[in-house]
Image (tube, grey):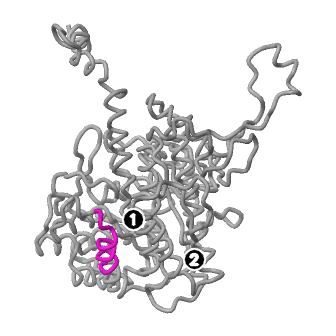
């Protein structure tokens, strides 16, 4: 057995810091991952974990992530994208903490959780089978069986594992038979993961630790409650292994570290069940209320002292509502990263501040946007920071991101003459302005999105810090502060759709295939676009 395998696995723990009046009230907590007596990573809750693509935060380099490690302590990765090659590339990484090493996130600074599917990806895919799940890769659809998933987990050693769940990604609505089948398969696969001994001799060993389970049942309150109750009962091993009868497992829930709600798939199913048109989907409050009642149905039978995580919330208002009505502890950063993709610099705070300078645009109903659409031409000559401070060099912008608080280890010298005057060089870096990032966006420069992603993550972390501060120092004011926030900021997130359209316009003008499109648009153009000619020549 290798040294990496012989190391004891890390232990994930969750502790409530405040007594909750009921199972669904907002609460303060702390997540700790202990690798050794001297190595502990902590995440305060309510808090944030980062959505990644194949383990990497989109648009950010490894250096960016390591520099901002205190704002990015928990990274969530999905494994299906790695199935494009067999064996999956991360499983070939040698040494201790192979997944951390492969991604480039030091184990001393980051928690990495792993699920099979990307919780934000709701693209339709072939149906799952009785003993396999389907996943999407850049090379098409791949299947995975529970034994292979367990084997891959053993090889890459993530800190936290999300159990396989048979969530359908075919077109809804789903029949009662399909929902029941989904629940039965997921419970069986969870038992296989926790049992520690499967039919495959290659992966016998200790049971997987630090397991999170997705709460299933679709849009049926009764089904969701039944699934949660099944987690509290034992599972017999006899039908899975052989005719030899074994002792019953302790309740599955005893070996589960927490629960997960995947909102993207649930939101898609709700849209069909309640006949919501795309236009009416903007009524976010109505939809998140439906989601919260479904989550309450799942959580009501379960113990209240375990971690509750949500994937794919779509606004800070949704996050606040789920904290207040369901006691959710962790949220992923998906919507804030998507806002950065579309050129939005977030600018909001909790509790709501009364500062009036450089605030985001107000709508006709008086509500503010949650950020600035930097594609908009109004920012072409706006030389303030993302949060609206002035133009002075070295000014504290109130944000620790790489856009608002850039820093350099030493002056960048471009020649011998500059080296002679190094003592006179100004070492303080000013922030990147809205006008500069507006220019980067319209010239299709990828550095714009790196600056925006880092900024949006810091703003979201500060938002959760504000939530924790109110819950700690003035919990009786929390409901009132949530109401103030909802009255102040646009809960329909209209800025997201506007920015997406602006992004599409620039991408069409500057993105991949631009030259071919321009060639087609030229008046009197003869023959195929140059790109097609070049492709034909290469093919020849």
The local secondary structure at tag 2 comes to strand
| Callout 1 touching callout 2 (CB < 8 Å) | no
Find residue 450 and report its horizontal and vertical position in percent.
52, 40
Looking at marks 1 and 2 on the same chain, the residue that comes earlier in the sequence is marked by 2
The local secondary structure at tag 1 comes to loop
Q: Nearer the viewer, residue 298 or 405?
A: 405
Please state the total of marks drawn on the protein image. Answer: 2
Q: With respect to residue 129, does 473 lie above or below? A: below
Q: Main secondary structure of the magenta part?
A: helix
Q: Residue at x 66, y 49 (%)?
A: 389
Find residue 291 and report its horizontal and vertical position in percent.
31, 74
Q: Residue at x 15, y 68 (%)?
A: 275
- Inter-mark Cα distance, 1 to 2: 36 Å
Q: Nearer the viewer, residue 282 or 528?
A: 282
Q: Which residues are magenta?
A: 282-294
Find residue 357 and report its horizontal and vertical position in percent.
61, 55
In the rendered image, which quarter is residue 193 located in? bottom left
The residue indicated by pointer 1 is 365
Q: With respect to residue 375, does 305 lie above or below? A: below
Image quadrant in which the C terminus is located = top left
The numbered dot on residue 29 is: 2
Q: Residue at x 52, y 63 (%)?
A: 48
Instruction: Let me know if residue 142 is in the magenta part.
Output: no
Please rate how many residues cluster around mark 1, counting C-alpha atoms within 10 Å: few if below 14, some from 14 to 19, many from 20: few
């Amino acid at each position: 057995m290798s040294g990496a395998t012989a190391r004891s696995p890390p232990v994930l723990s969750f502790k409530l810091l405040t007594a909750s009046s009921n199972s669904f009230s907002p609460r303060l907590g702390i997540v700790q991952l202990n690798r050794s007596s001297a190595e502990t990573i902590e995440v305060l809750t309510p808090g944030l974990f980062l959505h990644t693509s194949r383990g990497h935060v989109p648009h950010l380099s490894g250096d960016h992530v390591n520099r901002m490690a205190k704002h990015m302590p928990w990274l969530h990765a999905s494994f299906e994208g790695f199935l494009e090659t067999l064996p999956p590339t991360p499983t070939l990484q040698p040494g201790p903490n192979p997944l951390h090493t492969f991604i480039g996130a030091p184990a001393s600074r980051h928690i990495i959780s792993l699920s099979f599917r990307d919780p934000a990806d709701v693209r339709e895919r072939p149906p799952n089978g009785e003993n396999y799940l389907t996943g999407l890769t850049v090379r098409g659809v791949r299947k995975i069986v529970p034994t292979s998933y367990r084997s891959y987990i053993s090889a890459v050693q993530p800190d936290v594992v999300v159990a396989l769940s048979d969530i359908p990604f075919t077109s809804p609505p789903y029949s009662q038979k399909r929902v029941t089948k989904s629940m039965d398969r997921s419970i069986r696969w969870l038992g296989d993961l926790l049992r520690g001994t499967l039919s495959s001799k290659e992966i016998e060993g200790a049971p997987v630790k630090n397991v999170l389970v997705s709460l299933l049942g679709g849009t049926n309150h009764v089904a969701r409650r039944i699934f949660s109750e099944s987690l509290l009962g034992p599972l017999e091993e006899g039908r899975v292994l052989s005719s030899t009868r074994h002792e019953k497992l302790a309740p599955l829930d005893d070996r589960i570290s927490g629960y997960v709600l995947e909102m993207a798939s649930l939101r898609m199913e709700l849209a069909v069940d309640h006949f919501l048109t795309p236009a009416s989907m903007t009524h976010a409050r109505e939809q998140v209320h439906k989601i919260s009642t479904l989550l309450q149905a799942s959580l009501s039978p379960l113990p209240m002292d375990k971690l509750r995580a949500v994937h794919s919330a779509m606004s800070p208002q949704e996050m606040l509502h789920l904290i207040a009505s369901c006691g959710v502890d962790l949220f992923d950063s998906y919507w804030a990263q998507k806002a950065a993709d579309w050129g939005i610099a977030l600018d909001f705070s909790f509790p709501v501040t009364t500062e009036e300078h450089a605030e985001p645009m107000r709508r006709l109903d008086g509500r503010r946007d949650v950020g600035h659409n930097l594609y908009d031409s109004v920012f072409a000559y706006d030389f303030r920071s993302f949060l609206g401070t002035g133009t002075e060099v070295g000014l504290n912008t109130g944000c620790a991101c790489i856009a608002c608080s850039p820093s350099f280890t030493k002056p960048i010298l471009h020649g011998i003459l500059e080296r002679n005057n190094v003592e006179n060089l100004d070492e303080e870096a000013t922030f990147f302005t809205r006008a500069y990032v507006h220019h980067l966006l319209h010239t299709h420069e990828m550095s714009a999105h790196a600056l925006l992603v880092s900024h949006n993550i810091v703003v979201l972390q500060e938002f959760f810090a504000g939530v924790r501060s109110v819950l700690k120092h003035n919990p009786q004011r929390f409901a009132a502060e949530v109401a103030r926030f909802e009255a102040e900021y646009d809960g329909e997130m209209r800025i997201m759709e506007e920015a997406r359209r602006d992004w599409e316009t620039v991408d069409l003008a500057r993105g991949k295939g631009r030259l071919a499109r321009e060639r087609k648009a030229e008046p009197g153009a003869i023959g195929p676009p140059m790109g097609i000619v070049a492709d034909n020549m290469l093919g020849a």
